[in-house]
Image (tube, grey):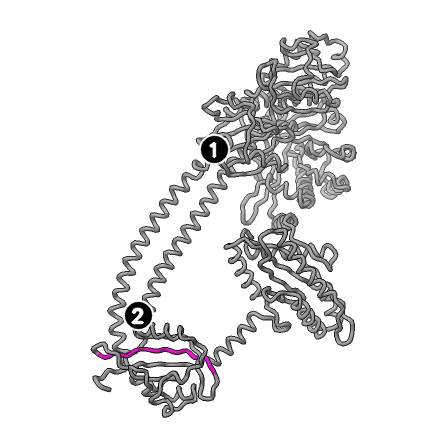
Amino acid sequence: MPHSPGLAPFDSELHIQRDRRRAIIVYVGGMLLLLAVIGAFALEQYRRDTQAAEERNSARADLVAEWVSSIFSASEVVLASVSAHLEGEAGAEDDTPAALAHWLGVLDADLGLLDRISVLGAQGRVLASSRGDYPPGRPLGGLPYYHRLLTLAPGEQAVTPLFWSPADRGYRVVHARGLADGGVVSVELKPEVFYHGLASMSMAVGQSTAIVDTEQQLVARFPAFEEGGSQGMLGKTVHGALIETFLESGTQRGSYRLRSALDDEERFFDARRIGDLPFVTVVGEEVSVALAGWVQRLWLYLSIVAMAAGLGGLLLRHYLNRLRLEGGLRQHEAQLRIAAAAFETHLGMLITDAEGVILRANDTFTRITGYSEEEVLGRTPSLLSSGLHDEAFYAQMWDSITRRDSWQGEIWNRRRDGEVFPEWLTIGAVRNAQNELTHYVATLSDLTERKAAEREIHQLAFFDPLTGLPNRRLLMDRLQGLLRDSKRGDRFGALIYLDLDNFKRVNDTEGHRRGDQRLRQVAERLSSVTRETDTLARLGGDEFALLLHDLGECPEEAAKSAEEVALKLLSALQAPQMLDGEPLVVTGSLGVTLFHEHAVNLDGILQQADTALFQAKAAGRDTLSFFDPDIQERLQVRARLESDLRQALPRGELQLYYQPQVTAAGEMCGVEALLRWQHPGRGVVSPGEFIPLAEESRVILAIGGWALESACRQLAVWAADTERQHLVMAVNVSPVQFREGDFVEQVLAILDATRAPAKRLKLEVTESLFMEERDDARAKMLRLSERGVTFSLDDFGTGYSSLSYLKRLPLAQLKIDQSFVRDLLEDQASAAIVTSVISLARSLELDVIAEGVETEAQRDWLINHGCTRFQGYLFSRPQPIEWLPVSAAG
């Protein structure tokens, strides 16, 4: 060859470009990974800060709701006291209007929270009032809501929304109770009571709390608005998406993020109904305040990314410069090797001159193409052209060779016998020392066998070998593709799950061969009624799936289209058919779910379709069912309970802790057995969190039985202990557990099995137990009382149980709820409720115990007001049995 041009390797530059691309890809990939990690971390912190704000709002909403409820609990006690006084024989005979008014005035002055206590006759005229501005005979029936209050049945209570009282020239809220003579006793409250209560609660910057009635009127808000203050906004109708949406939803509570209708400030809100009262508490926290820390951290993360990008760019630049230097050496070494190895390679090889005339060809080229070297010398490679590629393809190829001195790719050529085959072709330009083009070197490899293997692998990987339908993997790929496409538009798609009815029984009785024949026939029938653009797949066994797309933009239209296709599938299955000369009857159940641009992830869609199929089978088979999200959520809750609560007992995760109960003299007189759950993943789970779930799923039956039996076994141990044999064991009983038909038999069986002294067992029940089936509950209590078991009414004062009914129950004790004990020194309403409960217990000749006593001041106040039993952290926290002190002092 003239000028000794050699065979310069066409791929030396490609190696350099490849390494350049790798370095750039590593750099870009590293930056993307860093961005992804920091983004994920920032997103998680955003979620945590948002969740923290929502939890703060929820806690404050609970606190406000509890406080407002306590106000009306206090007024309820007053109403009950006045009603009892008026309906008693002494009150009916001795009270003159003046005496009654004087008594009401004393009662009003003692409480302080109430504005006026009044007694009205059946015609709506004042009989007596705690304030002199309502003289006897004054008609009040014309005031807002009073006409409804006069219709209250004896003992029935009602609370009004906020209304304007012309007589008082101010807003009022009325709590009333019907009397036996058709009249009512009412208690009036000023909105300022609620405002001052909110103002006394601790609030951070950016937080706000409001109380709105069910008429959307603002009752109180803190902090008040500067313009007009709280009085300026009082009674105004609050318009806005939050309160309107919440009231219309009918739910007990909800969390929102939106702009306030009062000051247009974006906040996290938590809205909660206050029991059965016509009020809603709305607690908010400004988004800018709640997320301020997150925004600062986000700027820090972005700074870190910028620094990493700059440093990485400098390192990348240094590496690319080094590659250019090494590339020259590698190219020179490769030029020396290629001359020796070119014609000994397993690849076909051609060498042409600068004009493309063939100069050399090796034996592998002959084996691949069928042309000998003599047949191609002096000709151009175009003799191999298959005619399958257009001019644009070859133009792009030569453009790459001209610009880069190389090209490689897949191409279809023609053998000497006319067979068209695929090959991998690499072309490199060879230049001399003066950079002049002298030759082209081409290598080629036959891809025929590889293509055949790829087709076979593809068939095995993506198609069912029995029916030839796409398999689960191909269905998932296409579903994932449809989800990506749907995010760029708003057209619906659908996934239909189909399961043959009773196929397993048929397969077991008739054999697998006939089962396979039946599946192939079913596949043919289903394929005959599906569009070519849709995907019909066999998932395995007798399960099939059909993926539909482009069902329209309207959900109703999409559902109708999906239903029509599903009905066609059912009809195709039900049509008469023969198998081996015998009639074949096939039916199926179909589950349908729709998806579009706002669809859940792929797993969620699959689960929805599976749930819909479950619904269809449950409906009687040979039918179809669309996905119902309510059933899905119930299934998820049930699954979580199955995996956690149902395994808690077998795994020994539940424990009983004991909290002492003491007398006024400080002597320990009993203990309360309290459940604790040590979850292996979450740590200690609050009883307030898992007990309601256990009751909802009825797992409480097993847990409650275990707790009662464990407590009784401990009682039996103490019976032989002279220091503790006097202790009474208090055990909480769930209403779900108590309402079981054989509850009494269960308790008696446990007492017999453990030999625990029944007179030392005290069952704590709540007021909710007596909201329904009162006579049944009373009968069970009487049966257990005959055995010696005593009863304590837990959380007394937080519900709405009938005082007259309580007198009929075999109770031994009333338990004052800790929410009232906690605030009795600072809150007049709490103090009034506690005083009323103690007085009620004394009048019913019941023992009374206060729970949640944490300070000596609380204990001393309770002793001075007649309470004789105590329980709380002041004496001891709940402890495992081995840590339980012998005495309260211990």
Q: Is residue 149 above or below residue 333?
A: above
x, y (%) of residue 674? 62, 38
Whole-number angstrom distance, CA of label 1 to CA of label 2: 60 Å
Q: Which residues are magenta?
A: 420-432
Q: Which mark is residue 264?
A: 1
Front residue of this view, candidates 727 and 460: 460
Dot 2 crowding, Cα within 10 Å, few <14, some 14–19, many 20+: some
Front residue of this view, candidates 557 and 327: 557
Q: Nearer the viewer, mark 1 or mark 2?
A: 1
Three-letter residue code for mark 2: Ile
Q: Which mark is residue 731?
A: none
Dot 1 crowding, Cα within 10 Å, few <14, some 14–19, many 20+: few
| Residue at the image point whose x is 63% and y is 63% from the top | 545
| Residue at the image point whose x is 73% and y is 58% from the top | 621
Q: Is residue 87 above or below residue 471?
A: above
Q: Is residue 466 above or below residue 501?
A: below
The tally of labels here is 2
Q: Badge 2 is on which residue?
A: 16
x, y (%) of residue 440? 31, 81
Three-letter residue code for mark 1: Asp
- Determine the secondary structure under disc 2: helix
Front residue of this view, candidates 516 and 170: 170
- Determine the secondary structure under disc 1: loop
The answer to whether residue 647 is seen in the rendering is no
x, y (%) of residue 802? 72, 26
Q: Main secondary structure of the magenta part?
A: strand
Front residue of this view, candidates 296 and 720: 296
Residue 332 is left or right of residue 460, and the answer is left
The quarter of the image holding the N terminus is bottom left
Q: Earlier in the sequence, mark 1 or mark 2?
A: 2
Residue furthest out toward the front? 391
